[in-house]
Amino acid sequence: MSKPLTITAALPYANGPLHIGHLAGAYLPADIFARYQRLHGRDVAFICGSDEHGAAITLRARKEGISPKEIIDTYHEINRKAFSDFGISFDIYHRTSDDLHKETAQAFFSTLLEKGALEVRESEQFFDEQFQQFLADRYITGTCPKCKQPGAYGDQCEKCGSSLNPDDLIQPQSTLSGGTPVKRKTKHWYLPMQEHQAWLQQWLSTGKFDGMQAPVTAHNPEEWKSNVMGQCMSWLQDGLRPRAMTRDLDWGVPVPLPDAEGKVLYVWLDAPIGYISATKAWAKEHGRSWQRHWTDPDARLIHFIGKDNIVFHCLIFPILLKSHGGFVLPENVPANEFLNLEGQKISTSRNHAVWLHEYMQDLPGKRDELRYVLCSIAPETGDSEFTWKDFQTRVNSELVAVLGNLVNRVMVLHHSYFQGRCSRAAGCEKPELHKAVARMYDEVQQHVEAYRFRNALQSVMELAREGNRHLTVCEPWKTIKINPEQAQADLEDMLWMLAHLATGLQPFLPDTAQRMLHMLNLPEKLNWQDEIGWEREHQLNATEMLFEKIEDTAMDAQRDKLTPQAPEVQPNSTLSPALGSISFQDFSRCDIRIATVLAAEPVEGANRLLKLTVDTGLDTRTVVSGIAEHYAPAEVVGRQVCLLVNLEPRTLRGVESQGMILMAEDASGRLHFVSPPEAVNNGATVK
């Protein structure tokens, strides 16, 4: 049996619905990874659930004038259904309000106490005299001491992402009364994080620490993202401090001590234990062993989160696991950055968001379209941006024009010429297609295991582009007239390739892959690199369109739903002044055509240059373009571009360039392709 693999996705607060930023940050990458691992036959437990305690819940309840229980029941169901409707393949979606979680969290806390991992401290904490209540972290706001932004919470600044303590805030205010809180003495149980600094630093830097024993296994720090390591090391450099593991609240898991009335477990002790209690619930339901996934020395634990949760998963939770004893530590924490929306940060308070449950209502049947776009622009190494225009363009020019077009052409031609009946057993006689398929599998494996899902998806799409190129070269619509046997062999080679393409698409576009396999009359699931098998006389199923073109009206309706945002002020314009006038005759001499990029590779010795092979409709030629700092070769292939075809040839780094790709440069210096909104014939004139 393979090593047990526990994949967790951050527990979303049950105080509001999910938006596409949540999906792009944690849940879609985790789902792709889980699906990929299952295709390899690995023992996966994909764990998530609602985080239903903490001050954020009580604040929402107080604002709406209802109980916290009503809040969590409402949003747990909304989010559970949204995840299910979108096809996120959790093995369990649990709740931290469940009795099993309460028992697990209280037992965990008691073990920490027994082992001397916590210390009792009496300290002065903020107190709202008007409401006669101690103020937990989220009940206090003030100016962030680091970025000076007003409105930071007592545990975190949402502007700069810094983790804070209430005492750090400048000019603190109570969110209950709006007044200035006072300090009063209270007793809490603290985690002395400073005592764990040495082994944490060693573990993060080297993957292990002195005296490390099973079940903890070493990890490779070189495989961790630089943004994750950077944030952790910054905290360690500043020096860790004690952090209270209990709070004065009436909502949460009660502290299991007789002298702790009115106190609950701190949400960042409570919530991550939710991964363990959810695994227990899943194991109980399926007759499995939860310990195998958390205490087995061979167990692998991977947390998918957003960057605002890095400290809690990489420092606090590992301290808690090690202090308790008997648990593995995370092998990796592949945190993503933030997704912005239409030029602004996603804002739930201002309703500037694309809500997942509303997307599923407005655009039913288009789960894979959203998966494709969010994966293509995933904020893996830096913040990225979602726009409905880009969504439309990617669906129409990539899913419709590349993937959907390939599948439709092959299936329609085979049905038209040969009634969809195969003349031979599954296989392929083309070495170039075998190489393309093998390359796809190799590249996807390398990228997924390194948490580079954008690149992995592009490697699968590159196989689709290779299929389109191959079909264009074979021209079975011509061959059928002079050599029907060769036309049939060519098309059945393509059917074999489509089966492998469907296999590669399964982690990314599961609905699309399943529909492709159904058209090919194959099982609805193929394991990774399975032999593709069918016998002679195999009958294909009917052809169906995989994707529909997205119309402007649908995108306009989605943009209209967003709350208008004030444009961000750009103090210094980067626009260059207009050039002097030219005559119409001068302009008419510029021959600009639509062309498709067939291949792309770096130019040796040049960091900024890509060598592109383009189909102009008139010929196939080489163009050298200075876009390598903005686009990887795999992101360029298959794109339709505007090409100045009658530019005098010029040799760059030993490569003759026969034209110029037209690009648009934004205020940040980023280059963007100038492309038609939908696929057109190569060679079409741009006027």
Image: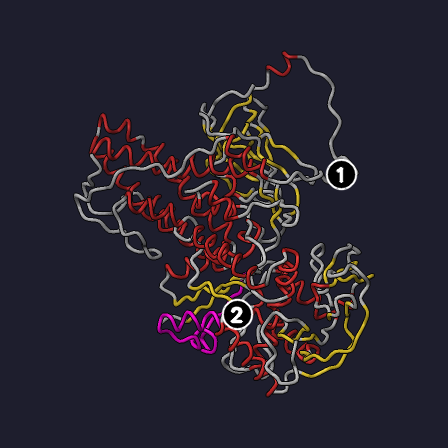
Q: Residue at x 39, y 51 (%)?
A: 506
Residue 50 in the magenta stretch? The answer is no
Lateral position of residue 664 relative to residue 361, left or right = right
User: Which circle, 2 or 1, is nearer the viewer?
Assistant: 2
Question: Who's the residue at 25% across and 35% down the image?
Answer: 414
Under tag 1, what secondary structure? loop
Residue 311 at x, y percent in the picture? 64, 66
Q: How many marks?
A: 2
Relative to 544, is 518 above or below?
A: below
Task: Kindly tell me whether residue 73 is visible in this rendering.
Answer: yes
Residue at position x 60%, y 49% in the image = 339
Question: Which amino acid, by three-letter code, is at mark 1?
Answer: Gln
Q: Secondary structure at mark 2?
A: helix
x, y percentage for residue 64? Answer: 63, 55
Q: Which of the pair 312/114 is nearer the observer?
A: 114
Q: Give x and y (percent) for residue 320.
A: 60, 77
423 versus 25 height, above or below: above
Q: Is residue 467 above or below residue 459?
A: above
Earlier along the polypeptide chain: callout 2 or callout 1? Answer: 2
| Magenta residues (range) | 277-304
Residue underneath mark 1: 570
Q: Which mark is residue 274?
A: 2
Residue in the picture at 63% in, 87% down: 116
